[in-house]
Amino acid sequence: MRLVVIGGVAAGLSAAARARRIDKFLDITVLEKGEWVSYAACGLPYFIEGRVRALDDLVLYAPDRFARERNVTVRVKSEVAAIAHSRREVVLADGAKVHYDRLVIATGARPNLAGIGGRNQERVFTLHTLADARRLREFLCSRKPKTAVVVGSGYIGLEAVEALRTNGLKVTLVADDARILGRSHPTLSKAVLDRLEQFHVEFRPGERVRKIEHDSVAGIPCDLVVLATGLKPNVELAQEAGVETGRTGAIRVTDRMETNLAGVFAAGDCAEAMHLVTGRPAYVPLGTTANKMGRVAGACAAGARERFPGIVGTSIVRTCGLGIGLTGLTAGEAKAEGFDAASALIEAPVRPSYYSQPLGIPHTQVELVADRRTGKLLGGLVLGEEGVAGRVNVIAAGLHLGAKVDEFAQFDFAYAPPFAPVWDPLLIAAQQLAKRI
Amino acid sequence: MRLVVIGGVAAGLSAAARARRIDKFLDITVLEKGEWVSYAACGLPYFIEGRVRALDDLVLYAPDRFARERNVTVRVKSEVAAIAHSRREVVLADGAKVHYDRLVIATGARPNLAGIGGRNQERVFTLHTLADARRLREFLCSRKPKTAVVVGSGYIGLEAVEALRTNGLKVTLVADDARILGRSHPTLSKAVLDRLEQFHVEFRPGERVRKIEHDSVAGIPCDLVVLATGLKPNVELAQEAGVETGRTGAIRVTDRMETNLAGVFAAGDCAEAMHLVTGRPAYVPLGTTANKMGRVAGACAAGARERFPGIVGTSIVRTCGLGIGLTGLTAGEAKAEGFDAASALIEAPVRPSYYSQPLGIPHTQVELVADRRTGKLLGGLVLGEEGVAGRVNVIAAGLHLGAKVDEFAQFDFAYAPPFAPVWDPLLIAAQQLAKRI
């Protein structure tokens, strides 16, 4: 009985490791087209920044170590050219064939660069693989560029802005429109724009970049360009084998991570996940979800019955020192989904005002969204320099568990002056929102 | 229609403010025996430490300002001697009588000093009122004591240790037994004891202090003594009027904060709260609960129908830089309550290991407890220097909402390198625990 896993990063290696735990006799082969397996792609911006000192620090397992410790065959530089499901075979680019009984497709995603010309220049970068990061860091260190343009205001774009600004470059952020993290949200936009301004980063929305000129982008002269225009799931290989994709364009899976082909599973950035707030599959390619999906795919491929219930769309990013946490739906998204959405936005200090600090008490903004019909929470936004992850995680737990906003407003949250004010910002926001329901 | 509130600190003033919001014509009188109303008792240790510069910073409202802004009669230095409920009258110590239609008893608690002799010395302190804090701070500044003994390893004791140590005193912590925060919990004890040792604070358990000598406590010479031996609810006034107390010794209330006497409510440190994990009333006198109970008592006394569902026993404290968050039940407590409790304790870094920091990545310890019969979470402990409040609040939300540990292990928590590792410590703990259920 052989399990073949296509892709050796977050989802693929999670699947292999989990399958091994479930069945110690299973023959497991991981096929990875790149040189490395199991690297922390989310750490790439921090390698660019210089905080992660060596690229190797981002590699969690050397291929041979993973292979040895988990008794898994790991073949790097092994690109799969086709899946011949009727014969239960994958065909490698070099023509070699590998039989499988069960297959996990963890082919990930790639930067979506459609329609951007002139990108094959030495000073143009994406930030998706270790090789990308190495090339960019080397360029920074050897060429000492002074000016950069980052194209795209999603996670990678915002993280790249921080990383380049920390390296002393003059940075301009260019985006198709004024949305930040793909959301039209005035509070979020204002907070990010204010912060970019404080950090002397110029934001130029409304610039759809079609071509990168020799010395400029969108008329902005620059020594360096980072393209961060979003991700596109790598589904072509699967599609050609008859695996169905969903409306999001990513691979459609059950809660056992199985595709429409029996015995073929998919996980990670190539697959959809059920969004538990909308009740519909969504495409939210993030590392933590990839790991969870990979575990379940590996377990089920090895014969266990596990399930991945889904996501609530939680994400967090830091740019120029500002933490941005999002979970569930914004009010606008909730309305578009047909909810009778109400929202409340508050700003409050993260500790009591008397707990003096040299630079004053940091504030946080919390927005909660709920459905008037059911009273249930639908989402939340947390902005600030402290406590962002903790608070957005509390909201995420509430979304998973179907919390009603009036009960949430009475939750027994921790209070002591070094940690929080007596009315936690979450409680204040929930109280405000409860009045509008 | 007159509402009388006995007690003008957290619960009392919350009740008065909330009642005013509900009914703008209600005649509201607050009777406070002390000089101040509405002060942040939880801030007292930080005034002792010196971080809170002026005692006034802890006073949220001057009595006249609260009276003016809320249109409430506030009478300070007005101690109530008796409640004559049959006549709907409270009798003040000076003999004056105040009629009420509705009554909120928010008489708070007092330090439990039973059986400790020799405590009326100038160098012996409790830390319960603004006057206590002022006297202690003045003593620190004028007498420059070099050595201190803190008696009691509860919240106030641990906070007092930190405050005095920060002021350069040699501090010994003395307690009846080896329990920390009233819990027999090896992990908690070890973490606190290790931290005390690092901060050169000696811990002497097994010393039941019966008498404070002229120059020593329990044989330990010292210039200063802080007694932090727990709180006792102020219920005598209520009891004499026929208000019933529960098994905890505090006033028994409904979820509308009403006592057994119709129209008489109780809230704050003098009252019980429903513990939603045990399903039985508990006595957990904390500021955040007092505020919530006070709001509901005020609302209901003013004729609204609100309810306070209860607490899950969340608390947080910092001592010598270590954050300690607790919610729900420890494994030991859960077993004593008849649950078939399982627990899992993990230690994990709060960020990915590659996200380098000058002092290394701080670790956190997370323990989760669940019931084998239902799979539901029963409690959690979080220890560390970062993220303690956020993580304990997530567990608290899970307790309020009846989370099962296997679903909790799949929650969509925020991940990005500056904030959390890809597997949040909460998820790791839940995965470990799920295996034992």
Image (spheres, coloured by chain):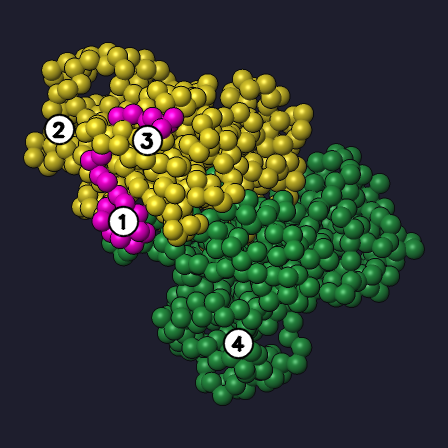
Chain colours: A green, B yellow
Residue projecting furthest to the left: B142
10 Å crowding of disc 4: few (<14), some (14-19), many (20+): many
Q: Which chain carries label 1?
A: B
Task: Say which amino acid is labelled 2.
Answer: Lys
Depicted A7 relative to depicted A331: above or below = above
Which span is picked out in magenta? B63-87
Distance Cα–Cα, label 1 vs label 2 = 43 Å
Q: Earlier in the sequence, mark 1 or mark 2?
A: 1
Location of residue B337 in the rendering, given as x and y in whole percent from the top left corner? 55, 20
Depicted A178 relative to depicted B369: above or below = below
Location of residue B56 in the rendering, given as x and y in whole percent from the top left corner? 20, 46
Q: Is residue B85 within the magenta segment?
A: yes
Q: Mark 1 points at which residue?
A: B67
Query: Which residue is at the front of the view, B259 or A27?
Result: B259
Location of residue A152 in the rendering, given as x and y in whole percent from the top left corner? 55, 73
Distance Cα–Cα, label 3 vs label 4 = 64 Å
Say the numbered circle drawn on residue A178.
4
10 Å crowding of disc 1: few (<14), some (14-19), many (20+): some
For marks 1 and 2, give the one nearer the viewer.
Answer: 1
